[in-house]
Amino acid sequence: MRYDAVAFLKALHAPAPRVPGPTLDDIPDDWRDFYRERVSIMVVSGGLPREQAEHFALLDTLDVMRNWDKYPTY
């Protein structure tokens, strides 16, 4: 059996496939203001780049939505 070392090494450095995750279109309209507020805070006060702030704000929004029944504090 022959191995192609070049193909093997190229495969090691190939980008990983992106798994589609939730997007802003997946959250209800009434939670979008919460999301936008989080983005603004992370950009203005936190100094994060907008793309990174949007990512973390979406994660934060989904987490609050998931736990809203347990801890409705917002």
Image: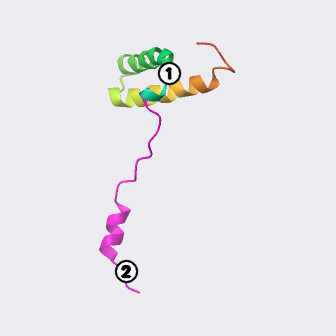
Looking at the image, can residue 63 be seen?
yes
Rendering coords of residue 62 (x, y %): 54, 27
Circle 2 is placed at which residue position? Answer: 3
- Residue 25 vs 5, above or below: the answer is above
Looking at the image, can residue 49 be seen?
no
Rendering coords of residue 21 (x, y %): 46, 39
Residue 70 vs residue 26, the one in the foreground = 26
Is residue 67 found left or right of 8 in the rendered image? Answer: right
Specify the amino acid type for callout 2. Answer: Tyr
Circle 1 is placed at which residue position? Answer: 28
Q: Which residues are magenta?
A: 1-24
Q: Main secondary structure of the magenta part?
A: loop
Rendering coords of residue 52 (x, y %): 38, 31
Residue 28 is a magenta residue = no
Residue pictured at 34% horizontal, 60% vertical: 13
Rendering coords of residue 70 (x, y %): 69, 21
Of marks 1 and 2, the one in the foreground: 1
Q: Secondary structure at mark 2?
A: loop
Is residue 34 found left or right of 2 in the rendered image? Answer: right
Colour setup of the view: rainbow
Q: Secondary structure at mark 1?
A: loop
- Structural distance between the alpha carbons of marks 1 and 2: 51 Å
Is disc 1 surrounded by few (<14), some (14 to 19) or many (20+) residues within 10 Å? few
Query: Are circles 1 and 2 on residues that touch, CB within 8 Å?
Result: no
Residue pictured at 43% horizontal, 15% vertical: 37
Specify the amino acid type for callout 1. Answer: Pro
- Residue 73 vs 24, above or below: the answer is above
- Residue extending farthest to the right is 70
Q: Quadrant of the N terminus?
A: bottom left
Q: Quadrant of residue 72?
A: top right
Residue 34 vs residue 52, the one in the foreground = 34
